[in-house]
Amino acid sequence: MTSGIYGLCCKATGKWYVGASTQIEKRLKEHRKQLREAIKCKLPIQQVNCHRMGLDAAIYGLQTIQAVILEQVDDPALLNECEMYWAEQLDAVEGGYNQHVPFPDRRW
């Protein structure tokens, strides 16, 4: 499993979500599952992680959400710092899907 920073980009809007994980591939599968469930079952937007991305996936289609590994980070102590860097570079908070970076009280 890859440890590091990943991004989810809606190709229709150009908006980004930036996340960090010690198991990126597993985390991306979780995001996809949540987005599929939101679209299929019409879950209330409040129940979908990254709810703004869930709304765009419902409008434009799941195929418009592209996953990218932005940076491999082997030292978990650096994940939050690297996540903040990428969120700033991709305007993921103000102009994207992140509500805040890094996730409060997250421990690796």
Image: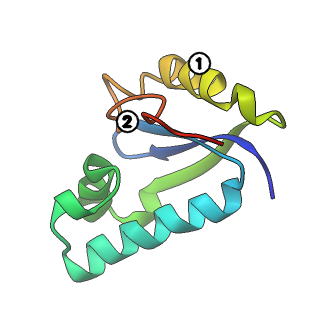
Q: Name the residue: 23% across, 82% down.
A: 41
Which quadrant of the figure has residue 42?
bottom left
For disc 2, the neighbor class at 10 Å (few under 14, some 14 to 19, many from 20) is: many
Q: Is residue 55 above or below residue 19?
A: below
Query: In this view, which residue lies farthest toward the bottom?
Result: 41
Q: Is residue 26 above or below residue 94?
A: below
Query: In this view, which residue lies farthest toward the left?
Result: 44
Q: Can residue 7 be seen by looking at this rendering?
A: yes
- Given contact means CB atoms under 8 Å apart, are the residues at marks 1 and 2 in contact? no
> What kind of colouring is applied to the model shown?
rainbow
x, y (%) of residue 93?
A: 36, 26
Amino acid type, residue under disc 1 in the picture? Tyr
- Label 2: which residue? 98
In the figure, is residue 21 to the left or right of 39?
right
For disc 1, the neighbor class at 10 Å (few under 14, some 14 to 19, many from 20) is: some
Instruction: For mark 2, give the secondary structure.
Output: loop
In the figure, is residue 72 to the left or right of 62?
right
x, y (%) of residue 12?
A: 36, 46
Residue 68 marker: none
Query: In this view, which residue lies farthest toward the right?
Result: 74
Amino acid type, residue under disc 2 in the picture? Asn
- Label 1: which residue? 85
x, y (%) of residue 68?
A: 64, 46
Q: Is residue 94 above or below residue 50?
A: above
Q: Nearer the viewer, residue 91 or 105?
A: 105
Instruction: For mark 1, give the secondary structure.
Output: helix
Q: Can residue 72 be seen by looking at this rendering?
A: no
In the figure, is residue 61 to the left or right of 8?
left
Q: Cα distance, mark 1 to mark 2?
A: 13 Å
Which quadrant of the figure has residue 7?
top right
Q: Nearer the viewer, residue 107 or 4?
A: 107
The C terminus: image quadrant? top right
